[in-house]
Image (cartoon, grey):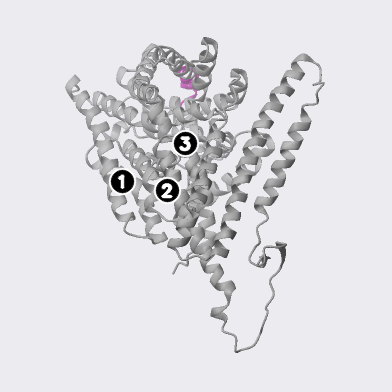
Amino acid sequence: MEGLEVTVLIGLTILVGTLLAPRVRLALPLVLVILGLLLGFVPQLREIQLPPETVLLLFLPVMLFWESLTTSLRSIRRDFRYILPMSTLLVVASAFAVAGIGLLFGMPWETALILGAAVAPPDATAVAALGRLLPTRMFMKLKAESLTNDGTALVLYAIAISLALGGNVTPLSVTMSVLTSYVGGIAAGVVVAALAYLLLRRTSSTIVINVTLLLIPFSAFLLAEIVHASGVLAVVVAGLIVAYVSPRVTTASSRRQVAAAWPFGAFLLNGALFVLIGLEVQFVAHEISAAAIGRLVLITLAVWMTLLIVRYLFQVMNALFQRRNPARPSRGARARSMAVSTVAGMRGAVSLAIALSVPAASATEGEIAGRDEIVFVTAGVILLSLLVQGPLLPAIVRWARFPVDHAEDEEYELAERTISGAALAALDDLALEHGVGQEIRDKVRAEGYQMLEFSNARALAREQAIVDAEAQALDVMLGEPDPLGGGSMSEEAEGDGADAAQTAVRMPDASRIVDDEDGSDGEVRTLQMLATSVDVDVMQRSPLLRHEEHTRLKLALLDRKREVLLGLRRDGTVDDLVVRRISARLDLEQVRLQGIEDYD
């Protein structure tokens, strides 16, 4: 099929899957894989191949960069002792365990090790697509692990290929490969991020900023490939650095574009990958002889079960070396948490790309036996992880009975109140600095107090809702209603919160003003033209001057809020994800004040 036909077909499949997934109550990746499998029954469609270089050089940098931009640095620092062995030692242990299974089923040692390297790393895109219902901290740990373990798998893959082609592999060469991969990848990511920072701090053009951000992942991957280092690690490091410095070197308009365009692009790439995985499974299944299918299915099931068992046992051993926490959960809770993490470790497109990268025997100096077997088993493991672990994950999470984590909501409310209070405290100084009159100063102060009251009311309403939910759960457990009628307080708090919310959001729009010149009534009425004479100098009309002063003061207050917010992040008081949420709201407010930038 032609490239345009393939593009339209995959796009239509993603559209159908997006419409169908909510109706059948399945996660979108699962629906897309099933649709890909169904399309594979058409012989012409089955010939659509997934070039491994397309995944490794085009799809992967974009998706990894976006996942890095939305990852919590504080979570990585806090759980680094957990993430490091899970992204390195666990990958090695999984690869060798799978290689042992391959040997039991008669695979050559080199072929079995290549298979182990392919299926060892959980995939970041699969985790991001299917792991959203996990607790926030567990999701971030799994996401950080998946972002970095591909580098370890690719090093193992290179070593296994060298062994298969008769190369001389020594402990020294393995050590140098690992060091080059990790140190070189980190260095490449830092260099590219530093160059991007120097460029971004010298421009305020939205187009220039976003083109620079688009080039960062590909440049980092390319530089790492040139020095034979881990391109995956280079992209991740560059993304984490850019995410940290972005609020200081980008504009509100450019950040709004990034927040709109990158998730959509990542969604399309993810969807295309899941569809192509289904097609690839059909292609491989039809390439294998019927006599060998039964044996390969058994190997696939054994490899899949081995990966789950090794992951669980490794977590048990890894827990022995973690820092002791006074608030550590019970042994049963830890076991349930490990079970959830085990099921959540799903394989995806990276594993298939590694398997497809295995050179065919006719294209190499030596001979690599069993390439079709590697691709078949890898595709089967991906399919099992998506179609079995994916639907099973919600049930496992419910079984684990994780306590509800309100930390993110509490940090969000704390940050909102802190930045609002800091802005109000600095209002007079900022008004004096920008030459803003007393009338506008009082108006903005009133708006600030309304926002602060709304934040306080929302926090109180959330806390009351938690208390009411606990009381209701206790009533259900005891089988008797609360004789004191605890719901009245909640309704009153919710009513107060709703009144505060209405007060906070009843702001006049562009066609309405508050007539509070005398400070008497504050009645809202429609703005009308008071004079139409050509002798009136419109530029000297006080509404225009008041609007300019109001805009200048609001922009200055937004800058002050961002400064305080970034200070909270720097001190570790609030998480990077909370900062992203609040920054998005501040950016929207700034774009509303300044208007949308015109592009030529």
**Which class describes the residues within 10 Å of circle 2: few (<14), some (14-19), or many (20+)?**
some
Mark 2, secondary structure of its residue? helix
Instruction: Give the x, y percent position of residue 414.
Output: 53, 38
Question: From which residue to which does the magenta span run?
Answer: 288-300
Quarter of the view holding residue 229: top left
Question: Does residue 486 lie above or below 573 as drawn?
Answer: above
Q: Earlier in the sequence, mark 2 or mark 3?
A: 2
Query: From where the camera sits, is residue 253 visible?
Result: no
C-alpha span from label 2 to label 3: 14 Å
Mark 2 vs mark 1: give the one in front: 2
Q: Earlier in the sequence, mark 2 or mark 1?
A: 1
C-alpha span from label 3 to label 1: 24 Å
Query: From where the camera sits, is residue 568 visible?
Result: yes
Mark 3, secondary structure of its residue? loop
Q: Nearer the viewer, residue 360 or 451?
A: 451
Question: Does residue 284 lie above or below 214 as drawn?
Answer: above
Q: Which residue is mark 1?
A: 193
173 left or right of 217 in image: left
Q: Which residue is mark 2?
A: 563
**Which class describes the residues within 10 Å of circle 1: few (<14), some (14-19), or many (20+)?**
many
Q: Nearer the viewer, residue 347 or 406?
A: 406
Q: Nearer the viewer, residue 178 or 477?
A: 477
Total residue callouts: 3
Residue displayed at 80% across by 15% down = 479
C-alpha span from label 2 to label 1: 22 Å
Mark 3 vs mark 1: give the one in front: 3
411 left or right of 155 in image: right
Amino acid at circle 3: Val
**Which class describes the residues within 10 Å of circle 3: few (<14), some (14-19), or many (20+)?**
many
Residue displayed at 47% across by 42% down = 579
Q: Which residue is mark 3?
A: 574
Mark 1, secondary structure of its residue? helix
